[in-house]
């Protein structure tokens, strides 16, 4: 068979090519219909002299642009444009792990056109198209040139990521500049002396609550002079990436930033060991304010320390100078004080115990709270295992070891006056300054503590529990006394014996308040202009599927005065039903209740748990004619390291004064409403359930009892003066055979001593 001639073959291939091109050229872009919100790359072509651009959705993988309608899918009638001017080909090469999330872009290629493709004044041969890129077909100075634009906006999440990276980059540059500027303001050679002093807490009459024994400070010369377990335990506890970062840990900083944003305040700093050392060594420069500026200065010092000193030297300095609570600085001092031995002789259990003190030296040491110290020691041991610092067998042996506390340390720390009050002061200090700064120590703290009232509270509570409690089945209690005019906590007894139990029931225990909670629906009713003489039915009540018994005193009806005096549940329930549970919750929160309140009928009868301190604070609003002051123990905080006269603590710089606190002197109720509630509560003491509290000082208050007499309450006040809350019960929430009348009796006995 004779093969076709070359010329004939070319004719056949040309016909086929022309046919294919003719089919391709029949694409009518104007008739393409896309689904709503469909995202498709587009090419905008604006011919010379045209008012607007033609839009071509790029659905396929390859397109030709030119004058030829037979060869090109995108036809541009312009003498500057070649028959086939350029091609667009989808770049389907993989782009790495993230290629799944991004659509493949197009590549523009000049198909040997006469007048070329330009981006600005630069001629393009081949280029990957980006969203918003603009080109001209022919030199841009030609009047007849054609303008094309590639439109393919990235997804929202991609743009957010891009802008986020731009912002992060800009912030990083600004931070570096700020750090370099700060570097000029201090020198790290030589290192300053940083050992200063412990926290000193004074009562309102300037009596120190804790006497710190004067001790010498000892520093070891080399890291190997410490127990080999100690540096590992400290790194595991405080900064597991210590040998990786350059003074500031970006991972820890980012985590702390997220925490602070969620919490709405700077409470976690993500500080490395070097940053902690920076705060301690350069306290005057870094400052004590709780701000981003302080964190920047702290980071600047940390970075400069890492520039001038080795990691081992900085770790040695940290081990020698970090504050360890109770007037001790450095692990040698702490080991001698808490454990009665040198830091070089510590075993794994003891090293982990001392390292666990670091997050809270004034609270977490084994003398103040042995069980907490054991718990935190075990966390450090587990962390050391996770970091392959010790074996699981070594850690298990250490966990099974008892911490042998130095008896002299126990004697000294147990000499603290008003230990429950002192413990609350330390917690309030952390709330005001933040965890990290508060635990550095060297603060002078003036409190509102009245030692005579505190002694009366402790003695009255102890006597009642030991006598009445023994017969009525309750073994614990709490007393809080507040000056309603200022919000100052004058006395706080969180239990009967601090040596046996450090759990502070005055503010750490959440208990059901029983009928003491009824002040909130009654107050809400008065705010809704419901007259206290309004009568409510004593009949049983069904509310939201719950059945409530009628009045204990019989059927009929009862006004608000009598209902509150006799603490009739169904009257309070009907009042709450009328005003709405939402209003009850809102007014309780306005008056200072911060615990979670569940808006169900049982809320009215004290179903939601509160602490004695916050409940007493809420009653103080009524005692103070509707004006709320945040209950607080601390009057002022002074910086013990910044004093004009070392012998006069009042010459020290004031860090925090309570007076201008934004939570003070807040009117939350109309004075008339508070006065009406005081009149309602007076009936409780004169002829109601709280008669045992009477002391002849115009006192008013409210009793409260929960199911099976598990919680026994009385909260009362002398108008415009003192308010005291009392709780009696058992830590395990077991039933008692007592009554709220016994709490009222204790209130009368104790407050009788106070007013005398």
Image (spheres, rainbow, N blue to C red):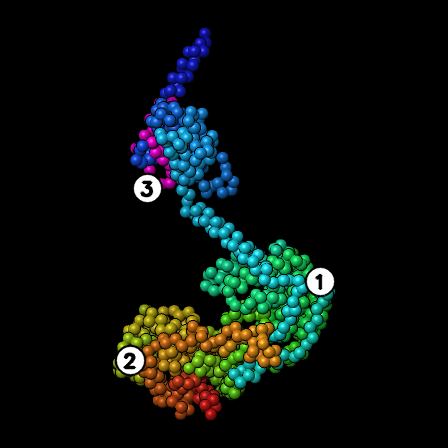
Task: Please name the residue that numbered disc 3 is placed on.
Answer: 36
The Cα–Cα distance between marks 1 and 3, rounded to whole angstroms, is: 69 Å
Q: Secondary structure at mark 3?
A: loop
- Say what secondary structure mark 2 lies in: loop
Which residue: 58% across, 80% down? 648
What is the spatial separation of the Cα atoms under label 2 and label 1, in whole angstroms? 77 Å
Q: Position of residue 400 (x, y in %)?
A: 65, 67
Find out whether the residues at labels 2 and 1 contact each other: C-beta distance under 8 Å: no
Which portion, as a residue range, is magenta?
Answer: 20-48
- The residue to which callout 1 is attached is 223
Question: Which residue is at a point 54% across and 60% down the rendered structure image?
Answer: 296
* Magenta run includes residue 418: no
Q: Which mark is residue 538?
A: 2
Residue at image point 45% right, 30% down: 109
Label 1 packing within 10 angstroms: few (<14), some (14-19), many (20+): some
Q: Is residue 326 left or right of residue 129?
A: right
- Asked if residue 522 is positioned above or below residue 131 in the image, the reply reads below
Label 2: few (<14), some (14–19) or many (≥20) C-alpha neighbours in 10 Å: many
The quadrant where residue 130 appears: top left
Rendered location of residue 365, percent (x, y): 61, 72
| Residue 209 placement: quadrant | bottom right
Q: Height in image: 224 above or below 590?
A: above
Q: Is residue 95 left or right of residue 620?
A: right
């Amino acid at each position: 068979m004779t093969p076709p001639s070359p010329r004939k073959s070319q004719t056949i291939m040309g016909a086929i090519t022309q046919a294919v091109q003719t089919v391709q050229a029949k694409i009518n872009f104007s008739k393409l219909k896309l689904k709503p919100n469909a995202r498709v790359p587009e090419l905008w072509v604006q011919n010379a002299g045209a008012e607007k651009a033609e839009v071509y959705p790029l659905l396929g993988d390859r397109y030709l642009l030119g004058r030829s309608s037979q060869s090109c899918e995108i036809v541009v009638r312009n003498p500057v444009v070649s028959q086939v001017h350029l091609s667009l080909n989808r770049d389907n090469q993989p782009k790495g792990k993230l290629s799944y999330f991004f659509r493949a872009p197009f590549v523009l290629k000049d198909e040997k056109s006469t007048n070329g493709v330009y981006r600005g004044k630069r001629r393009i041969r081949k280029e990957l198209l980006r969203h918003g890129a603009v080109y001209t077909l022919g030199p841009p100075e030609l009047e007849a040139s054609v303008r094309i634009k590639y439109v393919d906006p990235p997804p929202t999440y991609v743009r957010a990521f891009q802008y986020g990276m731009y912002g992060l980059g800009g912030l990083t540059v600004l931070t570096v500049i700020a750090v370099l500027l700060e570097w000029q303001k201090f020198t790290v050679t030589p290192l300053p002396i940083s050992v200063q002093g412990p926290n000193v807490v004074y009562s309102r009459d300037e009596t120190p609550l804790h006497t710190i024994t004067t001790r010498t400070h000892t520093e070891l010369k080399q890291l190997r002079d410490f127990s080999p377990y100690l540096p590992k335990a400290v790194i595991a506890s405080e900064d597991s990436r210590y040998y990786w970062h350059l003074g500031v840990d970006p991972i820890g900083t980012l985590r702390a930033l997220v925490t602070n944003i969620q919490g709405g305040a700077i409470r976690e700093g993500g500080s490395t060991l070097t940053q902690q050392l920076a705060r301690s060594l350069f306290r005057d420069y870094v400052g004590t304010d709780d701000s981003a500026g302080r964190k920047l200065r702290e980071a600047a010092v940390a970075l400069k320390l890492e520039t001038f000193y080795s990691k081992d030297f900085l770790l040695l300095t940290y081990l020698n100078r970090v504050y360890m609570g109770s007037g001790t600085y450095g692990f040698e001092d702490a080991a001698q004080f808490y454990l009665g031995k040198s830091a070089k002789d510590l075993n794994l259990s003891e090293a982990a115990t001392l390292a666990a003190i670091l997050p809270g030296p004034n609270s977490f040491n084994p003398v103040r709270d042995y069980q907490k110290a054991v718990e935190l020691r075990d966390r450090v041991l587990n962390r050391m295992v996770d970091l392959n610092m010790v074996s699981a067998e070594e850690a298990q042996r250490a966990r099974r070891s008892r911490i042998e506390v130095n008896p002299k340390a126990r004697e000294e720390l147990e000499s603290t006056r008003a230990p429950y009050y002192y413990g609350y002061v330390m917690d309030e200090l952390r709330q005001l300054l933040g965890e990290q700064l508060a635990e550095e120590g060297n603060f002078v703290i003036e409190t509102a503590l009245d030692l005579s009232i505190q002694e009366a509270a402790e003695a009255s509570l102890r006597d009642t529990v030991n006598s009445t409690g023994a017969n009525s089945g309750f073994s614990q209690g709490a007393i809080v006394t507040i000056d309603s005019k200022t919000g100052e906590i004058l006395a706080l007894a969180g239990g009967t014996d601090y040596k046996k139990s450090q759990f502070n029931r005055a503010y750490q225990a959440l208990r059901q308040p029983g009928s003491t909670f009824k002040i909130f629906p009654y107050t809400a009713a008065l705010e809704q202009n419901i007259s206290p003489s309004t009568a409510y039915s004593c009949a049983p009540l069904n509310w939201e599927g719950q059945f409530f018994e009628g009045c204990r005193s019989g059927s009929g009806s009862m006004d608000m005065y009598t209902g509150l005096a006799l603490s009739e549940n169904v009257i309070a329930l009907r009042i709450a039903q009328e005003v709405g549970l939402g209003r009850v919750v809102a007014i309780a929160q306005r008056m200072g209740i911060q615990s979670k309140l569940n808006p169900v009928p049982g809320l009215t009868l004290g179903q939601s748990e509160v602490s004695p301190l916050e409940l007493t604070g809420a009653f103080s609003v009524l005692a103070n004619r509707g004006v709320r002051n945040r209950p607080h123990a601390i009057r002022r905080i002074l910086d013990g390291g910044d004093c004009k006269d070392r012998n006069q603590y009042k010459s020290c710089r004031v860090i925090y004064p309570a007076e201008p606190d934004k939570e003070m002197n807040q009117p939350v109720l109309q004075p008339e409403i508070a006065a009406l509630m005081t009149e309602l509560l007076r009936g409780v003491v004169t002829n109601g359930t709280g008669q045992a509290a009477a002391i002849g000082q115009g006192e008013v208050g409210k009793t409260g009892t929960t199911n099976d007499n598990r919680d026994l309450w009385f909260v009362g006040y002398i108008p415009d003066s003192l308010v005291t809350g009392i709780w009696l019960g058992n830590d395990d929430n077991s039933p008692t055979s007592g009554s709220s009348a016994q709490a009222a009796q204790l209130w009368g006995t104790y407050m009788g001593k106070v007013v005398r």
